[in-house]
Image (cartoon, rainbow, N blue to C red):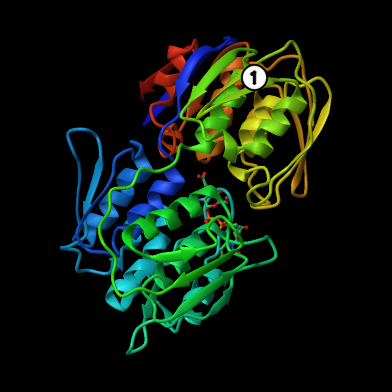
Amino acid sequence: MDIFEIEGPVRLEGEIEVAGSKNSTLPIMAAMILPGGVSTIPNAPYLADIASFETLLESMGARVERTADGALQIDSGPLDRPVGDYDIVRKIRASICILGPLLARFGKARVSMPGGCAIGDRPVDIHLRGLRALGARIHLEQGYIVAEAPAGGLVGTQIFLGGPFGTTVLGTDNVMMAAVLAKGTTVIESAACEPEVADLANCLNAMGAKISGIGSPRLVIEGVRHLNPVSYSVIGDRIEAGTFMAAAAITRGCLRIRNCPIHQMLAVTDRLRHIGLTVEEGPGECTVRYEGQLLPADITTQPYPGFPTDLQAQFMALLALAKGNSVITEKIFPDRFMHVAELNRMAAHLRKEGSSVIVEGVEKLIGAPVMASDLRASAALVLAGMAAHGLTTVQRVYHIDRGYEKIEEKLNRVGAKIKRLAV
Ligand code: EPU
């Protein structure tokens, strides 16, 4: 198992490149089940989660490979086993979004029910409610979701996907992918508006689907009889980009971030400017520069276009060094605070109160051995380690490899001192 040894403090400066979006690539890989045939994603990132999803598709009979130029190629023609096995689904929760496409293409699916994870319970009740509304019969059998379409196939209808927390990203994906081949028109109300959902919808339209209202909470889907394989490039990863923005800020440095979906990051750049950073925007890129101060800021995570929960931990690490007190409130996953105790081991002053954390800014963080608990929490620990005085050792680095492509190599090229060690 790898660990990171991080020497700090460092000041980051230079250019850094953002990879294709993980959370676009995963559902788009699921969408490639739909047409049968060879589809490609030219810019799919190299990540552990993507590799797990490849294994899932292969376990169902698809052929998956990386071409010589790095594109991810999926041949779903031979896919003939509409089953998501427990051993793979438990490793990657996004596996749940094979349910909609399998049901649409095969009229049946058997997918392991995902369990909870470090960031919360993560139920899938709304996914199932949406699929049932399209006519699917669904029951649970030995931990598996067993779904079957009615004899004549799924039928379009009006579906409400809201809940007490807002809406659901992968739930919207699942229902949308089932509805594209359903008979008649489906209207999804309270659909997730995240750019990754819009990316999936655009990919489905490139396959021949008829989806309108993309990017809005009301998606209208006219069912079509069949879809065609495609080659589709995903958007840049706004969470990786936001992590690099926080890295520039916490190290009091300056980073030019390329392939940055800056127009999808208004809530993030708003908070950065409030904290005292300069953010210069260019086409597909931005430059974040420290200007001699880190001011406190209150942050509340919300569905898009609000501040993303996937950057909450990284901004907590940053605000731990601000001059004053900040309040961070988590509205998407109220228990997503495993990083709080670890950051406190590095001399941060963080106090959890319900689904908020009071961040009392300190002058400096001090290196310490810490444990990564989930993907974004581990990114926060890497950021803190680069700013902290002395040596920080991050255990369980496999969490970060799930969602960041060669993060230590990218950060080391702009001034970080991170060693990956196999222990
Ligand atoms: N929820 C329900 N019932 C459902 C579905 C969701 O109660 O049927 C609740 C969840 O418990 C949560 C809220 O709804 O409180 C929102 O969850 P959502 O379904 O939107 O999350 P997700 O689709 O499972 C995706 C991302 C997450 C990201 C969230 C929120 C992927 C592969 N995952 O998860 O990304 O945090 O949306 O934006 O796209 C990450 O990349 O680190 C990550 C966790």
Ligand 1 positioned in quadrant: bottom right
- Reading the image, the residue beneath label 1 is 250
Q: Quadrant of the C terminus?
A: top left
The residue under the point 61% across, 25% down is: 246
Residue 372 in view here: no
Tag 1 secondary structure: helix
- 400 with respect to 310 (left or right): left
- 235 with respect to 299 (left or right): left
Badge 1, how many Cα within 10 Å: few under 14, some, many 20+?
Answer: many
- 130 with respect to 207 (left or right): right
Amino acid type of the residue that numbered disc 1 sits on in the rendered structure: Ile
Q: Nearer the viewer, residue 133 or 324?
A: 133
- Asked if residue 118 is positioned above or below residue 138 in the image, the reply reads above
- Asked if residue 63 is positioned above or below residue 180 in the image, the reply reads above
Q: Quadrant of residue 311?
A: top right
The residue under the point 39% across, 19% down is: 409
Residue 384 position within the rendered picture, expressed as x and y whole percent measured from the top left: 61, 22
Q: Quadrant of residue 36?
A: bottom left
Residue 271 position within the rendered picture, expressed as x and y whole percent measured from the top left: 72, 32
